[in-house]
Image (tube, rainbow, N blue to C red):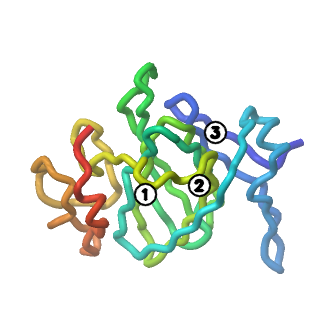
Amino acid sequence: MGQITVHHTPIEGLCILVPTVHQDARGYFVETYNQKDMQEVGLDLNFVQDNQSKSTKGVLRGLHFQKQYPQGKLVRVIKGTVFDVAVDLRKQSATYGKWFGVELSAENFKQFYIPEGFAHGFLVLSDEAEFCYKVTDFYHPGDEGGLAWNDPAIGIVWPGVSGPSYNGTASAAGYHLADGTPLLLSDKDQRWKPF
């Protein structure tokens, strides 16, 4: 029997994976990736690269996608908590333009599989977060696209985020979390256009 449980989302292809965690007084052991288990649940994937990032509270990364060389991603958090989001960009999909989000944390061990054809982003909810992900294609400089994180046409509900009404830009100016932590976006992420 496999070591992962799969929870399908309302958007075809997106799924949440929950690995079996073996815990005792010493700590825990978990298989974070097992190709055989993935194949048994219908995810026959070829990952070519692992990435890791560290961010502080209020950092929002995204929404990113690769244009000509799309990447499938298997994402997880090894420290802290993030709200992770995928937006369906597959034009023939019944859920084109729809989004789904899930809280990933070091404590819940959840992983989020995002197939090719989605924009992806995340918001850090803890003081600090370390984010790991496997991808099915290499990063190609100059091939990156993006969407405005706050575009009302997509309507992502980022937990605890408040600020001014949408003014047609992805600027983070005036936006903050419930505890007053300002939203932090890269200059590039503040220039992405609406959907």
Q: Which residue is mark 1?
A: 122
Residue 77 lies in what quarter of the image? bottom right
Q: Residue at x 77, y 60 (%)?
A: 21
Callout 2 amino acid: Val
Q: Amino acid at mark 3?
A: His
Report the residue at 79% width, 71% height from top. 28
| Residue at mark 1 to residue at mark 3: CA–CA distance | 20 Å
Residue at the image position 81 percent from the left and 51 percent from the top: 34
Badge 2 or badge 3: first in the primary sequence: 3
Where does the image place residue 117, in percent across and percent down from the top left? 49, 35
Kindly tell me whether residue 177 is visible in this rendering. Answer: no
Q: Could you give the CA–CA distance between mark 2 and mark 1, rounded to whole angstroms?
A: 10 Å
Count how many numbered circles sit on residues in the image: 3
Residue type pointed to by label 1: Phe
User: In the picture shown, does residue 109 fall above or below 147?
Assistant: below
Res 7 label: 3
Any mark on residue 75, and which?
Answer: 2
